[in-house]
């Protein structure tokens, strides 16, 4: 994969169907994007901690044009930034399964790993599903349409 650096373990875990993020061994701060050195305490020691594929929508945008996206997304597709449960506010980008007409910031989601083809390279990607549980999301809906 292109661009592997401090985030190599993230991509390896995602390829295996797992979600792992780096956590500082000294202060416990979870990091994303991945870093070599903790910005909180300066430690170089990190361990890759497993997280559930669950969280809350922090932001979203519905896209009606391809813009070079993976064909697997279909059109329109909804990109989301999800705040991962129990990860110190760390957020990951992914897409919502289906059209998600009633999506709201604050909606609960659960995720899975899918494979997408980007520039002739198959890579893992996060696909999020809206929870069936009643939403506690705010009625203010600031998602964008592109």
Image (cartoon, rainbow, N blue to C red):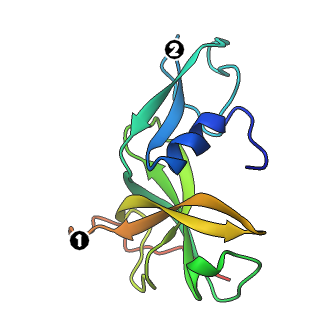
Query: Would you say residue 111 is visible in this rendering?
Result: yes
Circle count: 2
Q: Nearer the viewer, residue 71 or 106?
A: 71
Secondary structure category for the residue under label 2: loop
- The correct choice, above or below, for 85 with respect to 130 in the image is above
Q: In the picture provided, is 42 more to the left or to the right than 92? A: right
Q: Name the disc covering residue 25, or none.
A: 2
Q: Nearer the viewer, residue 64 or 40?
A: 64
Report the residue marked by disc 1. 132
Secondary structure category for the residue under label 1: loop
Residue sitting at 66 percent across and 63 percent down?
A: 122
Alpha carbon distance from label 2 to label 1: 36 Å
Q: Name the disc covering residue 101, or none.
A: none
Residue sitting at 47 percent across and 65 percent down?
A: 127
* Residue 109 percent location from the top left of the image: 36, 62
Q: Nearer the viewer, residue 18 or 45?
A: 18
- The correct choice, above or below, for 140 with respect to 24 in the image is below
Residue sitting at 58 percent across and 32 percent down?
A: 31
* Residue 76 percent location from the top left of the image: 58, 88
* Residue 93 percent location from the top left of the image: 58, 58
Q: Quadrant of residue 24?
A: top right
Q: In the picture provided, is 113 more to the left or to the right than 109? A: right
Query: Would you say residue 62 is visible in this rendering?
Result: no
Q: Nearer the viewer, residue 91 or 104?
A: 91
């Amino acid at each position: 994969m292109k661009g592997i650096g401090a985030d190599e373990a993230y991509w390896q875990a995602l390829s295996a169907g797992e979600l792992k993020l780096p956590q500082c061994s000294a202060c416990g701060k979870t990091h994303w994007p991945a870093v070599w050195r903790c910005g909180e305490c300066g430690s170089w020691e990190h361990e890759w901690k497993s997280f559930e594929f669950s969280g809350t929508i922090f932001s979203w945008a519905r896209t009606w044009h391809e813009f070079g996206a993976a064909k697997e997304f279909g059109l329109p597709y909804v990109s989301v930034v999800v705040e991962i449960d129990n990860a110190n506010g760390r957020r990951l980008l992914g897409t919502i399964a289906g059209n998600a007409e009633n999506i709201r910031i604050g909606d609960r989601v659960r995720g899975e790993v899918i494979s997408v083809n980007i520039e002739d390279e198959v890579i893992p990607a996060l696909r999020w599903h809206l929870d069936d549980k009643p939403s506690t999301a705010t009625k203010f809906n600031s998602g964008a349409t592109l």
